[in-house]
Image (tube, rainbow, N blue to C red):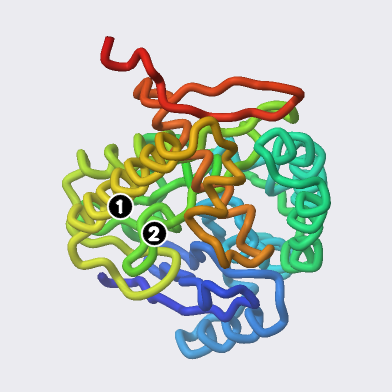
Amino acid sequence: MENMERIPIPTPFGVGRVNCYVFTGNGLTVLDPGPATQEAYEELTGALARLGYRIADIERVLITHPHMDHFGLAQRLVEESGAAVLAHEDAVSHLSDPIGYFEREQEYFRPFLISMGMPTEIVETVLELPEPYTEYQAPVTVTREVTAGDGIDVGVDLACVSTPGHAPGSLCYLAAADDVIFTGDHVLPDITPNPLLTLAPGSDNERTRSLPTYLESLRQVLDIDVTVGYGGHGDPIPALQERARATIAHHHDRKERIADLVADSEPTTAYQIMKDMFPDLPATEMFPGMSEVIGHLDLLEDENQVVHSETDGIIKYERNANQHK
């Protein structure tokens, strides 16, 4: 693809480097600059210099979704360049106050995780573990809110595709003329993105139904006539549709496994299912683990395969005995 460079930016996270994409055909545009670390800043500065540019030359910063490994460095770039920042309207509140957003999530998910059967002391550990990582982001003001169908000229015409699920406000950017789409973390080449539980857009007391939403967005990608994906991590995806179908199949298999666990040990909690599925899961991975289990339970409830009930504030799931009646 002409006038585009992929720059793998280091992150302090287990996922490894994040892909920053630089477009040079209509001024200088940066897509997902990486986390707010000095190492990321120096890597991007050096890469731009090799292309004949400086940070001060950046005219636009595009963000695929409000996770700190993707947007954290944006504010520093804006301060040095005066660049415009473009992101989906549902990501704006998170981007403008990421620490406040994290604190609101902590407040909401503390009683929620307890209701899912997680012991209180483990809940406190799980919610406090991410706190040291909050330094890898800075509040950034979105100067142009975009949504599905909006166009952006970066030297090639990009069309915004709304793909919530992995995060609220997730966007893919379609370059139809080049048969390419920039997928952020919506579709990745080697790993299956975890649709994490988070607050629903515009709410402090309602969670997302992240996995059902994510699968709806994946099926939307199947309807787009595009071959190659450029993801937020890893190498380009040469057969995007095939990868999307494989991701959908993975979640179908996982859903059926969880249905079997519910049937074999009913009634049970989401926390117990997580322990059955991932017996050696460290505390650092328990929130993603709970997100995955609860997401599949949401799917099973949508299909009337399971039902839930609440006793003394604890929610338990069991097979729907009336499903086939």
- Mark 2–mark 1 CB contact (< 8 Å): yes
Horizontal arrangement in the rendering, residue 204 relative to residue 235 (left or right): right
Amino acid beneath label 1: His
| Residue 321 % position (x, y) | 38, 18
Task: Return the disc, 2 or 1, that comes first in the chain's sequence.
Answer: 2
Q: Which residue lies furthest to the top in this view?
A: 325
Q: Can residue 163 be seen in this view?
A: no
Q: Say which quadrant the N terminus sits in.
A: bottom left
Q: Residue at x 54, y 50 (%)?
A: 274
Residue 12 makes an appearance in the image: yes
Q: Mark 1 points at which residue?
A: 250
User: Camera-side residue: 182 or 265?
Assistant: 265
Residue drawn at (46%, 78%), measured in percent from left and top? 7
Select label 2 or label 1 by which is in front: 1
Give the left or right position of residue 282, taking residue 132 as reference.
Answer: left
Marks 2 and 1, how far apart at CA: 8 Å
Q: Where is residue 237 in the image (x, y as percent from the top left)?
A: 26, 66
95 w.r.t. 4: above or below: above
Specify the amino acid type for callout 2.
Thr
The residue that mark 2 highlights is: 192
